[in-house]
Amino acid sequence: MNAITHHLPDEILAAYAGGSLDYAFELVVAAHVSLCDECRAALTAHEAAGGAVLEEVGATAVSPELRSRLFAELAGPEPEAAVPTWRRRGPYPAPVVEALEGAEPRWRSLGNGARQCMLEESARGSVRLLYIPPGQAMPEHGHRGLELTLVLQGAYRDASGRFGPGDVAVEDDDEGHQPIAEPGEVCICLAAADAPLHFRGIVPRLAQRFFRI
Amino acid sequence: MGSDAGQDERAGEAQPRALCEQTKQMLAVRDGRDRAAFGALFDHYAPRLKAMAIRGGATPALAEDIVQDVMLTIWRKAAQYDPARAPVSAWIFRIARNRQIDIARRSRRPEPEALDNAPEPASGDAGAGDILGLEQEAEALGRALLALTPEQRAVIERAYLGDLTHSEIHAETGLPLGTIKSRIRLGLDRLRHELKDLRS
Ligand SMILES: [Zn+2]
């Protein structure tokens, strides 16, 4: 098994701990930390800093009713867990299985054998699974803002190196970067962006309108 | 391994002092479903959690609903608390942050997979010395926070109370997180080894 060499930046982990990240990036953080003890330890360290802030932030008196309401609830029966506990399945860590609501990804073609499965899309950002056949280039695109790409299966290479399972790529510029999947397994990635991705070229531009990329 | 003598030796390596009240209370809630201990935790954390929720933008009434929800979650998830893996204030901070976001969005926030095993009992192989060591790191963080200038401290508070975006958070926060991170990492490595031994 290959060791993870590309990790989440510290400010992303701190922002996750503090709660200022949008859903799309939270999903990538939760998925990477599920696979990476180095970042799990770093995230817990940030939560320890959050705990220190909680201890020192001050105290606002709570109403006496709150205490009695709470203890009345403790006396009642504990409800069955309303949300199912998702488990890792194949290349998908539990948070991704949860985003898929336990179903298989519903892939849509991007052309040239590449596919995507949109998990969530809003004005604030988007997060999707990408499926790139071996030897195939990911459709070229630029973007404004931040993009995080986590490899779940297979591997790809781009100008900044090789990215294998568990590795996360951070792009925060508008440079066109063209990752190419390595021979062997199909490369599956989880990709989040805080602005729409702009695919370059005529066919991709059509695809952009058609597939809401 | 794991004999009483071995544990005594290990505990002896740490400075001879006791766990903090909140850690002991949380263990009593986890292992004994101790309501008096839970009441003491409520008295300590509820006003802090309310202040945190208000800083996060909640009205006082909503903040109390959040505090109730967070305290109930602490009671129900107590079995997952492991003082060898996270200080009690960090564990409660994480629950508070997650619940506050869940409530604001009306949907579950993506969270990392739980580690694939039950927490070890406090008297188990993790060793009192390891738990004490982690707690001392957490206390050192608290002291470091208090030692910052008011301006630096305000930035740290804003970052961990969700007021700063990732691009506003600078890698150099002024808090020494390296030592506590290494300690947590060592604990995870040992846990992975134990899981491997269990499975082989
Ligand atoms: Zn990592």
Image: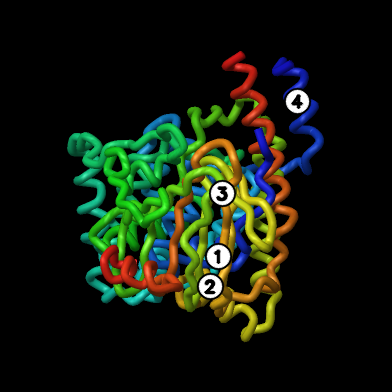
* Image location of residue A5, percent across then percent down: 69, 49
Q: CA distance from mark 2 to mark 3?
A: 29 Å
Name the residue at 62% across, 50% down: A163
Q: Residues within 10 Å of mark 4 (few under 14, many from 20)?
A: some
- For mark 2, give the secondary structure: loop
Q: What is the quadrant of residue A209 in the picture?
A: bottom left
- Residue B199 vertical position relative to residue B47 in the rendered view, above or below: above
Comparing A128 with A142, the one in front is A142
Q: Amino acid at mark 1?
A: Ile
Q: Is residue B187 left or right of residue A66?
A: right
Q: Quadrant of the N terminus of chain A?
A: top right
The residue that mark 3 highlights is A181
Q: Which mark is residue A39?
A: none
Q: Amino acid at mark 4?
A: Asp
Would residue A121 be seen by someone viewing this image from the given angle? yes
The residue that mark 1 highlights is A12
Q: Give the chain of mark 2.
A: B
Q: Give the chain of mark 4.
A: B
